[in-house]
Amino acid sequence: MLGRSSPHAAIIGCGLAGAATAIALAKLGWRITVYESGDNPASGASALPVGMLSPHHTTQPTPLSRLTAQGLSVTRSHLQTYLPDGHGWVATSVENYERGDLHQPPVLQGVDLAHIIQPACLIDAWLNHARALTSLELCTQTPITRLHFDDVTRHWNLLSTTGAVRSAASHVVVANAHAAPHLLGTLALGLRPVAGQITLGPSQMGTDSPSRITPKRLSGVYVPHFLTRAGAVWSVGATYRRGSDDLAVRARDRAANHDLLASIAPEATDRWSAQAKENLLHDWVGVRCASIDRMPLVGALPFGVHAGIDPSAARHHIPTAPGLYGLLALGSRGLSLAPLLGEVLAAKMSGQPSPLPLDLEKAIDPRRALLQSARQALKTRQ
Ligand SMILES: Cc1cc2nc3c(=O)[nH]c(=O)nc-3n(C[C@H](O)[C@H](O)[C@H](O)COP(=O)(O)OP(=O)(O)OC[C@H]3O[C@@H](n4cnc5c(N)ncnc54)[C@H](O)[C@@H]3O)c2cc1C
């Protein structure tokens, strides 16, 4: 039975990162308040209508490929546990292509198992399950604009736009992706936005022939058919605008998505043209949050001004703030990483052993991002 003595965490941001942390903390008996600036959960990048979960291939295992491999199996088990009826996701395969010689069509390299997922469905299912386990309050349309640690109460005050205190909590999880730097003051963690655009159209395709609906991947993915909450769609993309958090739809990005489609699925360009003529195509733009080394940031956060930090300092000598945690920089891999990393963070906050090996723990420590950022700043000054 939960009581006032159960630990309480405030989570800022209700995308894949915030909601995955919420379900993981709920399972460990925490009370939770989630603050989301949008009208609904999944208002940021996690509003992605069509996302793919698939292996990350590298010639040698890298920290990111190992983390993704571990994450894939956790996400698959979350799908089975929280959305067993398959609403909002489908298991499929994906054909992987690589560019051939100039003027030659891309060459099929192999086929992977994959899942197509609408993240908002998983996020809603997590929140519903968390509510059944614990006291979970979701405050939408509530941007948190400032954090202040009260030395007397040893609690964090979460302040809104008016400067009013929304809540005081002993534990805070910053999970608001590329907006986190505004909240963390001058703390330079090297986070940067990467906007991306996908193009979608309605799909009337029957699902009777699996080969016709098998996604294809080159620099982006073509999904011939997927049932979203808004109806059946096909989609192609996404683009990468590094350093941009601009949500505007760009004609250049739509053209890039058309080029991608023409190279891997020329048979689908007639459908594109017909739907474009009838004004049936639309684009979705979201902003990813990336780190310097492409690894996520998970764990206790430093706080405040670290402008003068010595880039050669040892990571473990950098002090972290009491009760302040982050799950940030999921990049293009939120579906593979969030469920696993929510569990990793909840274990850390609860003083339980991490499901990750020690070297991966170090590789996701937010303090290494502070040092990388300090090194980058030093290079720029030299
Ligand atoms: C075009 C595109 C295609 C993608 N394709 C894939 C894919 O195929 N597979 C895959 O795994 N991933 C994909 N991704 C990446 C995936 O969408 C992200 O990794 C994931 O959604 C990030 O989740 P998040 O919770 O960290 O961030 P978000 O979903 O952005 O969540 C952050 C939340 O914080 C809220 N917020 C912001 N500031 C505040 C504040 N001050 N107070 C309170 N709330 C706040 C926002 O409204 C938002 O809801 C894609 C992303 C894009 C843009």
Image: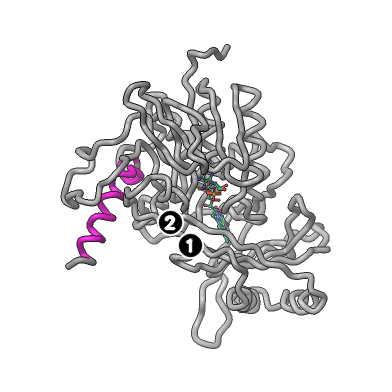
- Residue behind mark 2: 290
Residue 29's x, y, as percent?
52, 20
Residue 155's x, y, as percent?
40, 26
Q: How is the image coloured?
A: one colour
Q: Quadrant of residue 82?
A: top right
Contact, CB < 8 Å: mark 2 with mark 1?
yes
Nearer to me, 118 or 19: 19
Q: Is residue 232 left or right of residue 11?
A: right
* SS for dot 1: strand
The residue sitting at 48% across, 39% down in the picture is: 163
Residue 250's x, y, as percent?
60, 73
Q: Is mark 1 within 8 Å of ligand 1?
A: yes
* SS for dot 2: strand
Examine the rendered structure and indicate whether residue 350 appears above or below residue 279: above
The residue sitting at 38% across, 45% down in the picture is: 184
- Magenta-colored span: 361-379
Q: Amino acid at mark 1?
A: Val
- Residue behind mark 1: 194
Nearer to me, 339 or 107: 339
Examine the rendered structure and indicate whether residue 75 appears above or below residue 3: below
* Quarter of the figure with the C terminus: bottom left
Residue 210's x, y, as percent?
74, 59
Nearer to me, 103 or 14: 14
Magenta portion: prevailing SS class: helix
Residue 224 magenta: no
Examine the rendered structure and indicate whether residue 203 appears above or below residue 274: above
Chain-order first, disc 2 or disc 1: 1
